[in-house]
Image (cartoon, rainbow, N blue to C red):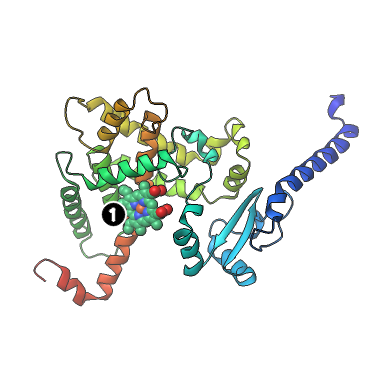
Amino acid sequence: MGLLSGDTLGPLAVALLIFLLLLDLMHRRSRWAPRYPPGPTPLPVLGNLLQVDFEDPRPSFNQLRRRFGNVFSLQQVWTPVVVLNGLAAVREALVYRSQDTADRPPPAVYEHLGYGPRAEGVILARYGDAWREQRRFSLTTLRNFGLGKKSLEQWVTEEASCLCAAFADQAGRPFSPMDLLNKAVSNVIASLTFGCRFEYNDPRIIKLLDLTEDGLKEEFNLVRKVVEAVPVLLSIPGLAARVFPAQKAFMALIDELIAEQKMTRDPTQPPRHLTDAFLDEVKEAKGNPESSFNDENLRLVVADLFSAGMVTTSTTLAWALLLMILHPDVQRESSPGG
Ligand code: HEM
């Protein structure tokens, strides 16, 4: 007990503070380098975390843009961040200098979800062979989806009729279409990845959508930003499950859906969907340590397709519906027999 008495606690706290400030000084150095654009002065350790509202960063970014110009830098704990605003800056960075900006930071913060050197999915994969391999595989499989019993176009048309029927069930009452649009888009992605669709009241699709939404919210909280900058914190037992409960549950659901497909798979038959096609590649790649085709990566690639494809497509469809409502003449022209 004597070890942590009042007498020793004071000097210990001072020593810890000095240690943290020195550590902060070391990590700040890169931020001071003249090649970084201007930005607000960072606080010790936290950097600029308190100057940005991560729940909705746009107003804070707007203020900083007015002060520092279209390209400014921030320090997220000890990670330097450059923020681009406006078409010209974004085009210069992502189009004219795409080679310099194509890489992504190693997804250390997601190790608890199964990310590792041989499993990076597509969205977060480093700019290299594994990313190229998976991007090519996903695009080709999406494009060639005549490969199963049904082509992608048939799945989309079938889903569109289910969606129209669900809209008609509202019997003219006002309603938000977002939930149904999300379900319809998820079903098309599920047909591509698992060869199945879910009824709109199926508890699993409801869970999938809830977890996607909650998982996205987990990306924007302050603790998430701190563990991203200091991923070693995630080795504290139970912390990952507290900070990312929805993302972990989302991956568990994807695992369950893949396991079902593995059980019903007949390797002598042509692949029914993307999961089967991936498993064929895993078989081909057996013994090749360089390959990104492995069971750990399959779950990440599938999860990426759901998270990248769902909200993007359903939001685009929601805008299309709004524009159709605002322009009934165009709606009439584009409807069958219009
Ligand atoms: C209107 C709908 C969509 C929009 C607006 C959209 C937009 C985007 C954008 C802006 C990117 C970033 C591109 C880049 O970093 O170079 C991206 C990447 C991606 N999208 Fe989409 N997307 C849509 C639909 C979909 C769908 C339906 C899927 C799959 C089912 C999908 C899967 C992906 C994947 C896997 C990536 C990562 C690609 C990579 O890192 O190489 N997206 N999307």
Q: Pointer 1: residues within 10 angstroms few (<14), some, or many (20+)?
A: some
Query: Which residue is more in the foreground, 246 or 195?
Result: 195
**Rendering coords of residue 264 (x, y %):** 22, 27
Q: Is residue 37 left or right of residue 86?
A: right
Q: Is residue 61 left or right of residue 217?
A: right
On screen, residue 230 versus residue 242, left or right, reads right
Would you say residue 198 is visible in this rendering?
Answer: no
For the C terminus, the image quarter is bottom left
Q: Which residue is mark 1?
A: 180
Q: Is residue 66 visible?
A: yes
Single out the residue that lies furthest toward the right. Answer: 7
What kind of residue is marked 1?
Leu
> Circle 1 — which element?
helix
At a point 66% along the width and 48% down the height, the residue shown is 78
**Image location of residue 213, percent across then percent down:** 42, 49
Q: Is residue 133 left or right of residue 94?
A: left
Q: Given the current orientation, which residue lies at the most extreme top position?
A: 287
Q: Residue furthest left?
A: 337
Q: Identify the residue shown where x is 16% and y is 73%.
A: 332
Q: Is residue 250 above or below residue 157?
A: above
144 and 306: which is toward the camera: 144
Q: Quadrant of residue 109?
A: top right
Residue 317 on image: x %, y %: 29, 61
Q: Position of residue 335 (x, y in %)?
A: 15, 67
